[in-house]
Structures are given as C-alpha cells and as structure tokens.
Image (cartoon, rainbow, N blue to C red):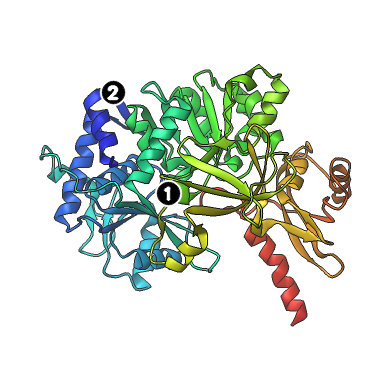
Amino acid sequence: MILSETLNKAARLFPRKEAIRCGDHVFTYREFAGRINGLAHALKHQGIGKGDKVAVLLPNCHCFLEAYFAVAGLGAVCVPLNFRLSAREITFILTDSEARILIADPMFAGQVSELREGGEQSIKVVWTGQPGMAGSSADLAYEDLIAQQAGIDHIESPAQPEDVAQIYYTSGTTGRPKGVMLSHKNVYLHALGTVAELNLTDRDVWVHAAPLFHLADAWATWAITLVGGTHVLVREFNAQAVLRIFEKEKATITNLIPTMLNMMVNHPEAGRFDYSSLRALLSGGAPIAPEVVRRIVETFKCDYIQTYGMTETSPYLTLSLLKGHLQSLSHEEQLRFKAKTGREFIAVELKVVNDRGEEVRQDEKEVGEIIVRGDTVTAGYWKLPEETAKSIRDGWLYTGDMAVIDGEGYVTIVDRKKDMILTGGENVYSTEVENVLYMHPAVLECAVVGIPDDKWGEAVKGIVVLKPDHKATEEELIGFCKERIARYKAPKSIDFISALPKTGSGKIEKKKLRDAYWRDREKKIQ
C-alpha cells in the first residue's frame, strides 16, 4: 500500500488511455509512467534516496504530478510549496524541511533568486520549461534529465506504508508554519475512500483547477490515477477559462474552492457553455453559503457535494452525499442536506464533543468541536512534538472546528474556534451571518469578523464586496440581516471593499481582515 502502486496499476490496466492533458502536452498512462520513471532515476543520480526531501514550486502542470509520483517512488518526501508565499517564508520551509532539491517553474525565477540571496545558496534547482534557465551553474533542466533516462529499467520503490510521503506546511497558531506529515498509508487509504464514495472510474475526467500544492485538489493525483481516469491541468485559475474547459474537455468531476465556484456562477458568461458531461462538482477548503450552493446546482445542473477536511486528514472528513432514503425528499429538502458540511467520510470516525469530551445532542443546536480518528489522519507535525501533542489526544485529532450535528449524522460547521465572536456575553458564529449576507442579491463576497468594542467586548463587523453594477448601503444590509437572524447576531457595521484577501489556496483570509481592526485598537491604546 504505497503510492507508486497507484501509477503502476494504471499503467498495467490502461497503458494506451490518456492520462494527462496539459496545454499542448498529452500523455498516455504508458508515456506518463515512462516520464516519471526517468525523473525518479534522475533524482536518484542527484543523490535523492529514501527519506530525503524534494520541494516543488510549480503551478498546476503535468510536471507537478510527475514530481509527486517520482518522489514517492524513491521513498523520498515531497514538500509542495505555496507559490504565493514570500521568498522569506519559502526559505523557512526549505530550511525547516531540510529539502535538498527544489523543482521550480521559470515563472518563479525571481523568488528563487531572492531566497538564494536570503541564505539558500546551496539548494540545487531543477527548472521545468525551456533549458538554459537563469540560475547557478549547478542548476539542472527538467526535460533534459528525463530525456537522459529514457528507456531505463523501472525503479522498485523502497517505501513502506508508514513512511512519510509528503509534508504540507500550514499556518500555525504559534506564528510559524507547521509541517503536516502524511504517510503513504494515509494518502493511499484516502484515495481508496474517495474511489468508493464518489464512484470514480476510468471514465472520469478530473480538472485540476484548484492549486496542486493544496490538498483540496492534490488528493485526486492518486485517486484519479488509481482508477485510470484522465487528468486535465489548468495552469492558473480563471473563472471563464475553467467554464470553457469544462465544455472542451468534457469534464466529469472536480473539487473547487468556494471562492472559485462563487466567481464562476457569477460570471456573466456562465450560461454560455455546455456542462452536460459534468456528473458532480465538489466544494472544499472553506465553508460555503447555501445560496451559493443553490446557484451552483442551477448553473451546472449536476450533483453537488460539499466536502470538509484538513491537511492533517489527507484531507476528507465529511461529504454531503445523500443517503438513499434522503433522495426521496423534495428538491428543497435535498438542497438543505447538500449545503450541510456532511456525514463522516468512509475512512474516518468522527464525533462532535463539548468541553467535557461528551458527544453533543443531535439536535442541530448544541455546538461542539469536531474530533476525528482513522488511518488517514496524520501522525503529527514535522519536528514539532509539542504541537502534535496539543492536537492529537488519546488518538483523536481535535480539529478546532465548531459544529452542530443532526439526527442523520450530518454535521454543519458554524465556525472555527478562533473565529467565534463573543459579543455582550453571546456567541455569534460568523458563518451563520455570512450565509445571510450571501442571500442579498447585491453581495458577491463577504466575511464577518469580531472587532473590538468598548461596550460589547466584540462587535460583529461585516466586510462586503458588491457585485459589479449593484448597489447596497450599510443600513440596507444590516436591516436585511436583522430580518433573518437575531438582532444581536446582525453586523453592527459594514465595510465595503473591492476585493477580499485570499490565501494561496483561494480561501478568504479572515485573520488578515480581523487583525487590521485589532491593530488599530492597540495603536489607540498606546
């Protein structure tokens, strides 16, 4: 049960099937496997062996998939890098992970030059794209390395199921990124789980539009390959381009970040394209408003599946797939279940517990923290045993996500613990308020945060991006909320901005929004 076996199986069963469509590049599974074997031999000749770290700084492209497979096949460890990080942040990750080689795209030459100036002079860089990239004399050309190993014997992987296959760095509460270690067993079992849950087959065409450095999309590297499906690579996300690709490539399924889906359904040309090949759209990586779910179903006319997971869990923990008896419900009732966070994923055990560790009532009212365990859950954080001990207790991973649960076992996340707003002694969950704001026809995107307030401790603040050619006032939106939720939950103020800050994976970055208001308060106190 090691990751290289997913590719070996596909190459045996589907040698002439199209594995990759990436711009002008089209490879069968036999050709794809040959390139990966060549890359693995090249990395081995550069001294990479079991346990060594190889970092990847690439946009979505076939080279990223090849790197994932080649590194895993050597028993080495892949360290995918968020290319939106600063050179300083990337330098920290390279140093902390002890990466020996960096596979990079020429578009990031500036960042590589900067990180070398910042102290990473020794790292060897393998450049994808055209040969002759700027860099040190020790730099290597990706395609040349593969060509030099053409036709060479297959490498037998030394990896074992419990060996670390990937380290993904996530933002940590300690102020420094934390490296989440995922083993071959974690990732392989997750792939098997998704095959079973989503009925993946060789007829599926998966569009990699969410970033491959993030597990919202990266898990499909293994699952789609395992069943002999086709990977379609989208180098950089653009709403109109992805809508067009759905039609052109006859896409059947993909997972997108809610902000991406929101941009797509609100695009003026969303109704122009043929989506008849789509059988399911998944949304993951962040909560999504029920009103956006409604628009997705109306636009794409395919099944919609809400997903929830964490880097620490490979990632899926829940899916909003309907149980058989729920499929006889009315369209509106089905939509209500689809907009929930979902019931537990096949590979994990999930509970919602209160502060005493007791399971909360299944009444969709009592709020508790989601905790999980299973073979897809990380063993811990790279070189951070104390952080590991804080998060994993008695075999259960404490997610920090607050949720309610219904009688069918479907959970609905109401907030992150750190995002919950305490105003006048009352808990306000930002997600609930955001869901109401998204119902207003003028609202394109929004975020709700707690800001300092002398009277209430924290006040509910709405931060809103309006749709083009739409208008709304602060008073109108506050009144809109007060008509639909308790008055104390409604925003006390609204700020209008042109765009919300996003993380590298496309999530709305609430921390950055919230911190700005608290910094202003600290300045006033000083």
| Total count of labels | 2
User: How many neighbours does mark 2 have within 10 angstroms: few (below 14), some (14-19), or many (20 or more)?
Assistant: some
What is the x, y in percent for residue 149?
Answer: 13, 44
Quadrant in which the C terminus is drawn: bottom right
Residue 229 appears in view: yes
Dividing the picture into quadrants, the one containing residue 258 is top right
As drawn, 520 above or below 346: below
Quadrant in which the N terminus is drawn: top left
Dividing the picture into quadrants, the one containing residue 63 is top left
What residue sits right under mark 1 in the picture? 213
Question: Gap in Å between the C-alphas at discs 2 and 1?
Answer: 26 Å
Q: Amino acid at mark 1?
A: Phe
Q: Residue drawn at (64%, 22%), measured in percent from left and top?
A: 326
In-front residue for pair 335/373: 373
In the picture, measured across the screen, residue 213 lies left or right of residue 305, that is: left
Kind of element beneath mark 1: loop
Which circle marks residue 17 in the picture?
A: 2
Do callouts 2 and 1 mark residues in contact (Cβ within 8 Å)? no
In the picture, measured across the screen, residue 477 lies left or right of residue 419, that is: right
| Furthest residue in direction bottom, as rendered | 526
